[in-house]
Amino acid sequence: MLLFLSPWIVGFVLLTLAPMLASLYWSFTKYQLPGDPKWIGTLNYRFMFTKDPFFWVSVRNTIWIIVVGLPLRVVFGVITALLLTRKRRGVNLYRTAYFLPTMAPIVAATLAFVFLLNPEHGPINALLRSVGIDDPPLWFFSPQWSKPALVLLGLWGVGDAMIIFLAGFLDVPQHLYEAADIEGAGRWPKFLHVSLPMVSPVIFFEVVTGIIFGFQYFAQAYIVAFNTGREANVGDPQNSLLFYSVYLYRQGFQNFKMGYASAMAWVLLLVSMACTVLVLRGSKRWVHYQGGGFLK
Amino acid sequence: MSAPPRTIVSTELLPARTAAEIVPRAMPPALVRRRRLHTAWSHTLMIAVAMLFVLPMVFVVLTSLMTDAQALSNDFWPKPFQFSNYSTVFHTIPVGLYTWNTVQIAVLGTIGVVVSSVPVAYALSRMRWKGRQVVFVLVLSTLMLPYQVTVVPLYVWFSKIHWIPSFKPLIVPSFLGDAFSIFLLRQFFLSVPEELTDAARVDGASHWQIMTRIMVPLSKSAIAAIALFNFLYNWNDFFAPLLFAGDDPHLWTLALGLNEFRGQYHVEFNLMMAASILFMIPVVVLFFLAQRVLIEGVTLTGSKE
């Protein structure tokens, strides 16, 4: 038994437990590489919450991308999945088309959007100008439009959520619809009272992972900043893409303030745990489980 | 509309009629028209949505075939088609080197995850021991753990033993199990009938033999699914290579190297798009080849037991 488990035990101790404890300890120290950690008590946390303006900028940006991006992704995912549920000619072709962008690696997809949304040369703004919008958004070059642009990128790659929703919709037992038909339910009530409750666990899963990934949003922002400005810093334009993980990267791996980065990481852990618990609690009211929960 | 002719077995209750007499009534023309209209409308909608997904890709492909000047114009259609962009990419960045680096990391990382996760999943599903449930919950909770909490110390420690920059931090941890893969495999192993493994135990097979001779052959699809997931993850990953190999351009993966097209004065969009497409092709091909396996994997992750 131990032999079978040994890779996990070693991995858990070396790659999870020890680093967790180390970063917890370091979060109470000033640890500027290449120096050594020096105990400073709760100073990192106090500075973070009361004095560091960038911390709150990163928190606001992260909340923005979660609160705006996640519901849009869920709604768009449900709509596209619904479009693909009905058996009609060519449905496989449609499925492939809808899923195509999701196959693109994040780097490739982000670079594609850097080009598509280029204010001067990009095809999107060319289209917008041709329909009479004379000053289309500057997208990744403007602090107002950079986050909406990333939301568009997220919607383009909605396929991963979509196929999970689609599987959920296709799994709804046919007899439930037949029962609803007998009751004389129309299309909309059938969706609202049969399909939606039946896929609610899947939607719930998407919401929880969406929140957790929201706090870890990094690569897209980094690639955008790197490829839009010559002297760009991660988080640009004008810190509008300074998400929580981006700021943590800046502090930890550009400024090498390991103590501060550790403190940020622990705040992140506690907040995402709290969010997950809150969503879990709330879920009892709107998630419908057939025959018990996940762990039983 | 040509229903097969039905034969009525009990003729007592019905007036004597032959099967040939029962002819489906033709649909009233109004209904036919409505149905056609509905089909046309729903296809229009589906195509419109498909455009949203596909058009950006079309723009990318078209731009990858444009000349430098054209890529910076508002033209949609390349004139002339400059296929040489795809070979220019190879001269502009060391595509061969980046590909080789990416393949090494993706393949070795995938082997590591499979080799280490199978026995753990076996112990969590087919062996009875105290604390099994606790360990399973721990595995699940590491799945939820944000990587930021561990990455700072790992970075410090890896750099202390001079593993940065190198591939070691990207490959070695894979050999210590991956929570997601362990979870997936465990779910699959649980679905293998106990009778099979019990019979083998009665015949005196050891756990190791049961795992390698019974479970692994029976779980080929699940193992293929986790191998694919991990391969794609490693192929696409940006953060870990940036952190652990970013300082040495000789160690860059394709995901890192793709960012090198911001030219001296402007971004070379045509080359950047061509390189992105080259980067995507293996992934897309893999997706199509392994569609069935991937879908099985997705259903395994489903919240159903």
Image (tube, rainbow, N blue to C red):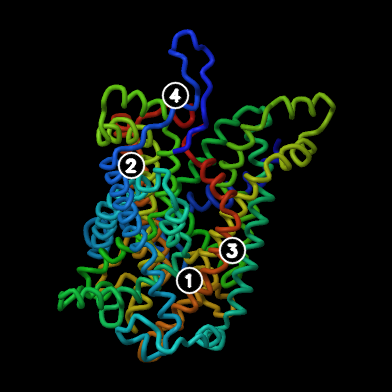
Q: Which chain hosts label 3? A: B
Kind of element beneath mark 1: loop
Q: Same chain, marks 3 and 1?
A: no
Q: Which chain hosts label 4? A: A
Q: Cα distance, mark 2 to mark 4?
A: 27 Å
- Vertical relation: B296 (above or below) A102: above
The answer to which of B262 and A270 lies nearer the viewer is B262
Q: Same chain, marks 3 and 2?
A: no
The answer to which of B145 and B269 lies nearer the viewer is B269
Q: Which residue is mark 4?
A: A291
Looking at marks 1 and 4 on the same chain, the residue that comes earlier in the sequence is marked by: 1
Q: Please state which amino acid type lies under the numbered disc 4.
A: Gly
Q: Which chain hosts label 2? A: A
Q: Which label sits in the foreground, 1 or 2?
A: 2
- Vertical relation: B285 (above or below) B39: below
The answer to which of B256 and B164 lies nearer the viewer is B256
Q: Please state which amino acid type lies under the numbered disc 3.
A: Pro
Q: Which residue is mark 2?
A: A274
Residue B190 percent location from the top left of the image:
62, 32
Q: Cα distance, mark 1 to mark 4?
A: 55 Å
The answer to which of A238 and A30 lies nearer the viewer is A238
Look at the numbered discs 3 and 2 and tell me whether their residues touch, using CB distance below 8 Å. Answer: no
Q: Which label sits in the foreground, 3 or 1?
A: 3
Q: Cα distance, mark 1 to mark 2?
A: 34 Å
